[in-house]
Amino acid sequence: GIQVEQSPPDLILQEGANSTLRCNFSDSVNNLQWFHQNPWGQLINLFYIPSGTKQNGRLSATTVATERYSLLYISSSQTTDSGVYFCAVVPTTLMTTDSWGKFQFGAGTQVVVTP
Amino acid sequence: DTGVSQDPRHKITKRGQNVTFRCDPISEHNRLYWYRQTLGQGPEFLTYFQNEAQLEKSRLLSDRFSAERPKGSFSTLEIQRTEQGDSAMYLCASSSTGLTFSSYNEQFFGPGTRLTVL
């Protein structure tokens, strides 16, 4: 099956710093989402971004589908940005759309933002 | 629209007991997914429904696990004869195969049910 690798596994930032998280995937995808998991376990949608670039406030993301990677940028980090960031993909298949659905998640990047 | 909800949020049970979890998806979403997440790992896919039809099941879903979505709305996940290895966070997500391709199958997650098997 498709492999999803996230880097770095851990990141410690001082408040106000910028950072880049990376997600590499081993096969073509038709869905890619970035999530932030808060300390209570809730997965919060950040971006639906199978290709292209999007921005939402201090966060932005870019997916280069042809090169099989996605980047999540955090600018001017705040302590509330702490948590685990997951990349999740749905691989493209030659089967019917009924097979489009299940996510393959990466192992996540644990981000700690210190005051 | 209040998002995806799950009940209970926490469940502690003894080994060998049966447990059942409920998921209520976003009301207009026709797809519903179950995932399992253990400590330090990303969520792993268990099964998913389109309307009331269960379209795919992971090999992780042993015969002790069963999921239903009887009327295409809420879903239940039952684990029979629980084992300590079943301790995990069980996450439910929903999505819509709507008309707007840009949001096709964007998945939204509930808060999860944390299961502890003693």
Image: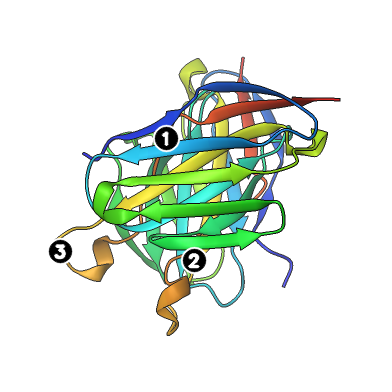
Distance (Cα) linking label 1 and label 2: 20 Å
Which amino acid does the dot numbered 1 rest on?
Gly
Cβ atoms under marks 3 and 2 closer than 8 Å: no
Q: Which secondary structure, mark 3?
A: loop
Choose between B57 and B96: the one closer to the eye.
B96
How many neighbours does mark 1 have within 10 angstroms: few (below 14), some (14-19), or many (20 or more)? Answer: many
Distance (Cα) linking label 3 and label 2: 19 Å
How many neighbours does mark 2 have within 10 angstroms: few (below 14), some (14-19), or many (20 or more)? Answer: many
Pointer 1: what residue? A106
Distance (Cα) linking label 3 and label 1: 23 Å
Q: Which of pointers 3 and 1 lies earlier in the amino acid sequence? A: 3
Pointer 3: what residue? A95
Choose between A81 and B62: the one closer to the eye.
A81
Image coordinates of residue B100 in percent, x first then y, are 45, 82
Q: Is residue A67 shown above or below B102?
A: above
Q: Which quadrant of the view contains residue B46?
A: top left
Using residue A49 as the reference point, say whether residue A47 is left or right of it.
right
Q: Which secondary structure, mark 1?
A: loop
